[in-house]
Image: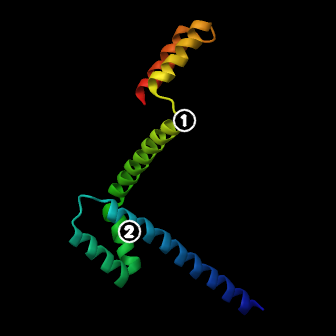
Amino acid sequence: MWDSFWNFLWSMIIIFAFVAYLVVLWYIIADLFRDHKASGFSKAIWVIFLIIVPYLTALVYLLAKGQGMAERSQAAAAEYKKESDKYIQSVAGTSPAQQIADAKSLLDSGAISADEYEALKAKALAH
């Protein structure tokens, strides 16, 4: 009975390590192709070493390029958000001019104060 429990536990540890490695590998390969400063040759070398010596190469990559990896990830997320916001605005059909006009009509009707109008205007102009 205990033998089967330890086999099960060991299998779970191995599966967890493999899945964790796949996740790290996915992020490393995505980062490799996101890095426009690296040459194609250096990218190929990283991929070859990821295949030959996977865990060691992944660890070395994270240590060597971890900071740049985080910066590229943040830049990609910001770019995605900007494009997403732009798409949502185009689908919604509201332009900054329309948003300012709507805010002005709310100001004229007394629904918002002058400070709130200026805040809405600044937000519309920022996009």
- Tell me the quadrant of the picture where the N terminus can be found: bottom right
Q: Residues within 10 Å of mark 2 (few under 14, many from 20)?
A: some
Q: Is residue 22 left or right of residue 1?
A: left
Residue occupying the point 27% across, 75% down = 44
Please state the horizontal and vertical placement of residue 104, each as a whole percent of the image.
52, 13
| Depth check, front residue: 74 or 79 | 79
Question: For numbered disc 2, what is the local secondary structure?
Answer: helix
- Residue labelled with disc 1: 92
**Colouring method of the image:** rainbow
From mark 1 to mark 2, how far is it between C-alphas?
36 Å
Q: Is residue 5 left or right of residue 16?
A: right
Residue 47, quarter of picture: bottom left
- Tell me the quadrant of the picture where the C terminus can be found: top left
| Depth check, front residue: 5 or 19 | 19
Residue occupying the point 53% across, 78% down = 18
As drawn, the label of residue 29 is 2
Q: Is residue 59 left or right of residue 44?
A: right
Please state the horizontal and vertical placement of residue 34, each as a whole percent of the image.
33, 59
Label 1 vs 2, first from the N-terminus: 2
Residue 103, quarter of picture: top right
| Residue type at numbered disc 1 | Ala
Please state the horizontal and vertical placement of residue 38, each as a whole percent of the image.
24, 63
- The mark closer to the camera, 1 or 2, is 1
Residue occupying the point 72% across, 86% down = 5
Answer above or below: position of 103 versus 96: above
Question: For numbered disc 1, what is the local secondary structure?
Answer: helix
| Residue type at numbered disc 2 | Ile
| Depth check, front residue: 119 or 3 | 119
Residue 41, quarter of picture: bottom left
As drawn, the label of residue 108 is none
Q: Residues within 10 Å of mark 1 (few under 14, many from 20)?
A: few
